[in-house]
Image: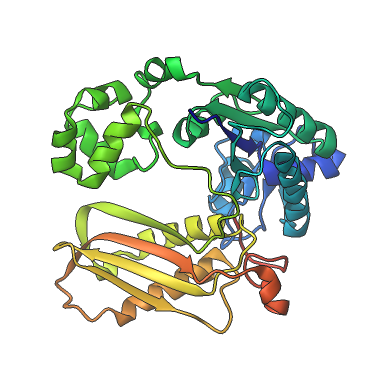
Amino acid sequence: MRKILHVDMDAFYASVEQRDDPSLRGRPVVVAWRGARSVVCAASYEARTFGVRSAMPAIRAERLCPDAVFVPPDFTRYRAVSRQVREIFLRHTDLVEPLSLDEAYLDVTENHGRLPSATAVARAIREQIREETSLTASAGVAPNKFLAKIASDWNKPDGLFVIKPDAVRDFLTPLSVGRIHGVGKVMDGKLAELGIRTVGDLRARDVHELESLFGRYGRRLHELSNGIDESAVTPDRPVQSISAEDTFAEDLPLADLEPAIRELASKVWTASRKVERVGHTVVLKLKTREFRILTRSLTPATMPESADELATLSLALRERVNLPESTRYRLVGVGISNFRDADELGEQAGLFGGDGDSTSTG
């Protein structure tokens, strides 16, 4: 049985700013450029009490928290701290799978320090992060990645939560199905129509029924409801693409997709700023009422410098969809692909996912 950790830095960008500028400590800090087109990169816990969240338009964050201190992001510093944290992880195991600058999975089934348990490894890592970076991290300990991810969020901030193998089913049973990865608003609504509100409700349904309703994902839901996740921690897996998509409650014409495209572009932009590689291609994905899938892509000479510019490029790709105006769409997705290492790009690295100025970020 595997011993998996998920370690997540607490309000990472905002915490780095508060660490480096004592005048910001205890104050609501929003890491973002001010302006109507800017997007929040991160919010301190003081700002979160007002409802401010990452990927939110900065202008909305300002309305929610008029006293917020806006700090422009400094990705050079964030990446340097991320490398420090990565080095701490690697002292304990070679099996480290970074998800972004501020979180990673670790397989500590065998650990370099021969500590007696995964919990002991998690404690050691959190102590070393605190001592060496003056920042805090939360950690989840569990038999697999699915459970470790849930656990790391359980006692945030600066928390540790352990899900032992013999407690998995009891832990999962009362949880909302929305805690399962991949269950968004649309899927949650479909499950609600079936009377499925908790993981226990989901587990009680026959796997063949779930498969008939949701295809392969139905079986995946059944497995997760039983705490089963066989995916391995994969070290040094380079990011190839980042995308987000939305399935509509009602099928929509192409002309009505702009709000969804803009929202998805903000999410993708936010995620792209958390990785060290740099994307080169913008992708628009559409699925028609008849389940026909279309993709349109563009590799511009210069990648967008803000979420708004990413949205503009994505919206422009609609012009390359040559289906009748009467066509209705059930899903839209926005993505960035063709990622490369920043050091391959020379000066262009600062334009996207790098260290240059930008209108908005994630």
Query: In this orientation, which residue lies closer to the viewer: 64 or 76?
Result: 76
Point 31% across, 33% down: residue: 223
Point 63% across, 21% down: residue: 117
Q: Residue 13 placed where, x, y %?
A: 70, 47
Point 46% across, 62% down: residue: 265
Q: Is residue 171 visible?
A: yes
Q: Is residue 350 visible?
A: no
Q: Residue 39 placed where, x, y %?
A: 57, 56
In the rendered image, the vertical position of residue 39 relative to residue 113, given as above or below:
below
Q: Is residue 302 left or right of residue 176?
A: right
Q: Is residue 305 left or right of residue 131?
A: left
Q: Is residue 89 left or right of residue 211?
A: right
- Which coloring applies here? rainbow
Seen as rendered, the residue at the extreme bottom is: 301
- The quadrant in which residue 171 appears is top left
Quadrant of the drawing holding the C terminus: bottom right
In the rendered image, the vertical position of residue 147 relative to residue 200, given as above or below:
below
In the rendered image, the vertical position of residue 119 relative to residue 149, given as above or below:
above
Q: Residue 168 placed where, x, y %?
A: 42, 20
- The quadrant in which residue 226 appears is top left
Q: Is residue 106 left or right of residue 197?
A: right
Q: What is the number of callouts on the image?
A: 0
Query: In this orientation, which residue lies closer to the viewer: 159 or 68?
Result: 159
Point 23% across, 27% down: residue: 196
Q: Residue 220 placed where, x, y %?
A: 30, 39
Query: In this orientation, which residue lies closer to the viewer: 356 or 348?
Result: 348
